[in-house]
Image (cartoon, coloured by chain):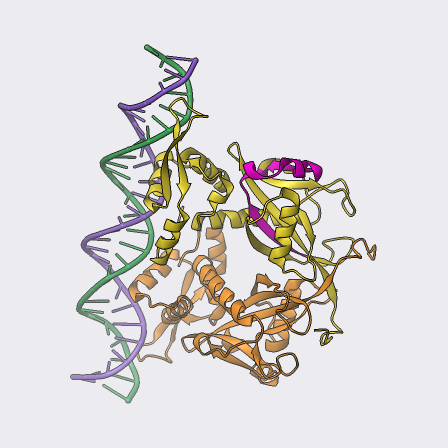
Chain colours: A yellow, B orange, C purple, D green
Amino acid sequence: MGLNTYSSEDKALLAVDCIIFGFDKGDLKILLIKRTFEPGLGEWSLIGGFLKKEENLDQAASRVLHHLTGLRDIYMEQLYAFSKVDRDPAERTISVAYYALIDIATHDTSLIKQNSAQWFGLKDCPKLIFDHDRMVLHAIARLRRKTSNNPIGFELLPEKFTMKQLQNLYESILDKELDKRNFINKVNALDILVKLEEKDMSVSRKGAYLFKFDEEKYKAKVEEGFSFKL
Amino acid sequence: MGLNTYSSEDKALLAVDCIIFGFDKGDLKILLIKRTFEPGLGEWSLIGGFLKKEENLDQAASRVLHHLTGLRDIYMEQLYAFSKVDRDPAERTISVAYYALIDIATHDTSLIKQNSAQWFGLKDCPKLIFDHDRMVLHAIARLRRKTSNNPIGFELLPEKFTMKQLQNLYESILDKELDKRNFINKVNALDILVKLEEKDMSVSRKGAYLFKFDEEKYKAKVEEGFSFKL
DNA sequence: TCAAAAGTGTTCACCGTACACCCATGG
DNA sequence: CCATGGGTGTACGGTGAACACTTTTGA
């Protein structure tokens, strides 16, 4: 409205940076880019961008993610605002970190190449610019907590998945091995998956049944006080 | 460094708003001020301020809190960044909300009056300006989660407190009644309180033993894998 | 002696965890 | 027929929840 009520206050640049998680071949990964601009040219960093006048932070994060992966309507959540005065050496910038969960199979590989981006296993990450390493640590901690209490892990899997894949996913998120029988018993007790007729024949001779997450059923159960816990 | 690397990007105002929790006479309360300036003159709001060039967000939040209460070294935690485009009608402002826990007995009452601030029970809060009601809801949810998994509830109590006070605190945070015996058994099992010789004689004829939180013991136990849970 | 709060243990149901064998199939 | 991964059930200990009576003391 241009009232300039706050005209004497300092302004700052606002950025969003995204920790993009994917799950591939039993490993949890994040997507990084090699910067093609200063500051930090040639170094690895999270993908990010600046907040524009006409959008909110969620929209900025979605835009940035869409730009790199071609994906929309992705699970994203705001993590934390990083504001150390000299965190960006070029100019005072506050960055709000977001994390996103994507099914690694569905994203646009060519876009990634174009942006000189690359997937890294959590243990093979290069050092990142600025405070991006801290952001990643925050994101992992949040991911652990969230996937334990909410059925968001499925966002990292294809629509149809085997129990083994689901277990591997949780094992790599939590970074510990789980007992197969206990895991399956727990998942079955939740009663929010649909077992399909179809089998995944790509791994074993016997084949493994595929499952789908039943979102409707989950929502209905939540209404009745159910709470997810894995 | 004035490189102006990002010169074409939009800048915005950055505010911090604080949800200040206190605990008094068995009730969880928050501190609100009646605004003496536009926009929103005469309405109730959280306390807040703008981020300055030379400070980070944590520092800004501490400054704002100190200004209103005279207190320093208070437990504070960043909550969430609120960024709806028109959330402040005067000018584009992104606000990062913080919550703080204070021992209501130790703050400076005169400062509060000077600032036309006032404590409100959670259920007696007036409607707040902008998106401050949402911030409060976020803060309560976070407080519930945090106090259940971390020994931060003690920040809301005097250094010495009775079991009854502690139970009342948790009851008002969680908004549900707890069983006295189970609560005390649980607390004792944690083994992180020191029972003092001293009694609080102000409530009953018999008097109730006072306890202190033993931070050293707690930290030592955490080192050994202990995790707080109430 | 009585009113009012303080203090104290036990039982039971359920959940998390440890643990090992048979099945189905393609080669 | 055999190697490989898929699929299944039970027993035990520990934790969380329900529950009631005695103690202390000042008025």
Q: Is residue A154 magenta?
A: no
Q: Is residue A119 magenta?
A: yes
Residue B118 appears left or right of C18 = right
Q: Is residue A116 above or below residue B124?
A: above
> B50 or A111, which is in the foreground?
A111
Q: Quadrant of the N terminus of chain B?
A: bottom right
Q: Could you say where residue A102 lies in the image, as x and y percent from the top left?
A: 55, 43
x 37%, y 55%: residue = A222
Instruction: Name which quarter of the figure residue B46 lies in.
Output: bottom right
Q: Could you say where residue B145 lies in the image, as x and y percent from the top left?
A: 45, 59
x 50%, y 54%: residue = B219
Q: Is residue D24 above or below residue A197?
A: below
> A154 or C19, which is in the foreground?
A154
x 31%, y 66%: residue = B180
Does residue A177 appear in the picture of this structure?
A: no
Instruction: Name which quarter of the figure residue B170 lies in.
Output: bottom left
Does residue B113 appear in the picture of this structure?
A: yes
Q: Is residue B107 above or below residue B193?
A: below
x 50%, y 74%: residue = B30
Q: Could you say where residue B187 lies in the image, as x and y percent from the top left?
A: 37, 60
Q: Quadrant of the C terminus of chain B?
A: bottom left
Q: Could you say where residue D27 lies in the image, as x and y percent from the top left?
A: 28, 89
Residue D13 appears left or right of B52 = left
Q: How many marks?
A: 0
Q: Which residues are magenta?
A: A95-122
> A67 or A46, which is in the foreground?
A67
